[in-house]
Image (cartoon, coloured by chain):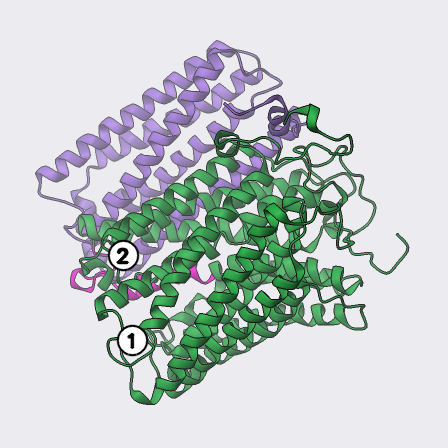
Amino acid sequence: MAATSVEHLHSDGHFVTPQDKYSSMKLGMWLFIATEILLFGGLFAVYAIYRAKFPEMFFNGRDELSLLLGTTNTVILIVSSFSIAMGVTAIQRGKKNLLTFLIIVTLLCGALFGVNKYFEYTAKFHHGIFPSTDIFFALYFMMTSLHMLHVIVGMAILFIIMIFNMKGKYSPSNYTAPEVGALYWHLVDVIWIYLFGLLYLVA
Amino acid sequence: MADGTMVEAVRPTYLDRKGFLSWALTLDHKRLGIMYLVTIMVFFLFAGIMGMLVRLELLTPGKTVMGPDTYNQIFTIHGAVMIFIVIVPGISATFGNFLIPLMIGARDVIFPRLNLFSYWIYVGGALIALVSLLHPIDTGWTFYTPYSIRTGTSVIPITFGVFVMGFSSILTGLNFIVTIHKLRAPGMNWHRMPLFIWAAYSTAVIQVLATPVIAITLLLLIAERVFGIGFFDPAKGGDPILFQHFFWFYSHPVVYIMILPAFGVISEIIPVFSRKPIFGYKAIAYSSIAIALIGFLVWGHHLFVSGMAGWVAKVFSFLTFLVAIPTAIKVWNWLATMYRGSIDLKTPMLYALGFLFLFTIAGLTGLFLGTLAINVHLHDTYFVVAHFHYTMMGGTIMMLFAAMHFWFPKMIGKMYGEAVAKIAFALIFIGFNLTFIPQFIMGMEGMPRRYYDYLPQYHYQHVLSSIGALVLGVGILVMLINLIYCIFKGEKAPSNPFGSKSWEWQTTSPPPTENFEEIPQVTDWTYGYGKKN
């Protein structure tokens, strides 16, 4: 590595206090969340336009989706958001091992979500439904797969945080990374709740 | 560096450490700024050669050197590379990186690792985009559907490359916003910030808010080709005009990503070489923010003839006129700054004056195009081509060149050669106008853009334009050779050769790695020229 002592000072020397680091990281994450919302916002716009244009297609398409699996996945993600939020509280109170445990719970939820998605997708393929079937299913596959990608990224972030936590990097005076990671996970959850409503529920 | 050879007066600089890895893995915002600059200039030359080939082909009606399909590919490469790889990061990533921490009195950006990561994402995205050169795309840089869904050329690599570079743009913008919020030196409140910082901040806001939309647009275009989703394909119930809306929702704000940093650069240069405080500081600062916000609401003016409800077109036309106001406020304030100043026509100031001339033409012709009735006549003609070259080349690139001269002593620690630089400026200025003024006239007379062939009546204008392009190209080469020569052979530069009051000049040239020995205490703005020190 080329990082000399000068560069080390350089990269971390700014953060005079953990509070500064905390507020900077949080501002950064909120900005990033804004970009994510705009990314999905494009798809929401497509959804609004074509739902207005082809209401029947959306109605019929919705009936093809498995409400059971969709609801299950919604519950799973809400539980995972709850567990990661508890994890942040845990590290704020210095309970390092509890954070590790709660991240594992969150990761398991994420994995379970993926398994359910896999079953949903394969069932669609068996019925001969593909992204090219019609615009509703194009939207369904684009939205849910892009969301799944975010679930995977969120799991990777939380996994890294878990490793650092097991090495004892976080404490009641330094819980920036767990909190910012959790913030991202909540975004993933919130986007799913919108997708669930728009794709599975709306008549 | 070996200490034994150093004279006592020589201070350590950020350029001291040598070797490829010391650059490739650097966390230093100044080095990253230089790396962006070098990368961008390489792509600029490449895309510039493509532009020259276009002008060469148009020298005569019919075939001159290439066939029509090749011609389509060449102008697409020219446009796509210039826009996405060169001008979008053109000033914001290069001088933004180099200057923001120096100007606000910080030691670096707030997330240096993220900054390095952004650079390599940018390079990666650019390389992915270049893969499409194997079978170059022929859609024009706008990738309009449905042609971009059906063409056999390689659309996917270049759109995916642009998608990847979008991440770099978002992360850089995010980094700059947080940096400007959190790392200003003590005493530097918002109204003491240099205007370049205001411009960079506004740019970063657009980068963060607009780029995700092009990301999803290009992703959907790729999905159209790979999976056959039909959002933009009329054959499947989709709507190609929706693609245009999506595309321009990003690509109009992005012209402000390109031009706002140029506004920042000229706001720094004019007070220094007029020896006067900037006139209307707050007006310039807040008009940057106003442009960033209104700029999001005008994209529809690219679609006046694509099919749009009459009242919508009127609203977009009105908003387009509205965005001209903050821009005109800026131009007026720059002129007022020069009024009765002690003007020193060094090269950066010459570029600034050139900018004022060219950008005024660019802005006013933009108003022609924003007028509904005239737009129908001028849409997709050479008038549009000339207009956006006046904004992008006459605006952004001219100020990029100005910045490359103005901050050359700070970046390299040497002076650029003044006489040759002025000759280069003259060639660039004359060549540029010679290239594009005939295009305005041709456009008015009805010459459509992107056409391979043309009627004989446009011949002499095309010839003038091509001669102009040659002069322009020579000018750019002279400028670059002069600068590169001066990197090695230039006179040693003092800390503050131009007598600027901005903070980046208050440290040594080139600055040490940590920028300042001690973080400055700010008690005033940086434009107090002509008063006691």
Residue B396, horizontal then vertical, whole percent: 54, 62
Q: Which residue, given by chain and number where applicable, does mark 1 sit on? A: B451
Instruction: Say which residue appears at 56% left-offset and 12% top-offset.
Output: A94
Q: Observer-nearest residue: B152 or A137?
A: B152
Residue neighbourhood size for the residue with mark 2, other residues' Cα within 10 Å, grouped as few (<14), some (14–19), many (≥20)? some
Chain letter matching colour green: B
What span is in magenta? B230-252
Q: Which residue, given by chain and number where applicable, does mark 2 sit on? A: A51
Q: Label 1 is placed on what type of residue?
A: Tyr
Tell me which chain the residue with mark 1 is part of.
Answer: B
Instruction: Say which residue appears at 14% left-offset and 39% top-offset.
Output: A124
Would you say residue B219 is visible in this rendering?
no
B529 lies left or right of B250: right
Chain letter matching colour purple: A
Majority secondary structure in the magenta region:
helix
Q: Label 2 is placed on what type of residue?
A: Arg
Instruction: Say which residue appears at 26% left-offset and 45% top-offset.
Output: A142
Q: Which of marks 1 and 2 is in front?
A: 1
Tell me which chain the residue with mark 2 is part of.
Answer: A
Residue B343, horizontal then vertical, whole percent: 77, 68
Residue A123, horizontal then vertical, whole percent: 13, 35
Same chain for mark 1 and mark 2? The answer is no
The vertical placement of B496 against B360, above or below, is above
Residue neighbourhood size for the residue with mark 1, other residues' Cα within 10 Å, grouped as few (<14), some (14–19), many (≥20)? few
Q: Observer-nearest residue: B497 or B247?
A: B497
Q: Does the magenta stretch include residue B181?
A: no
* Total tally of numbered discs in the picture: 2
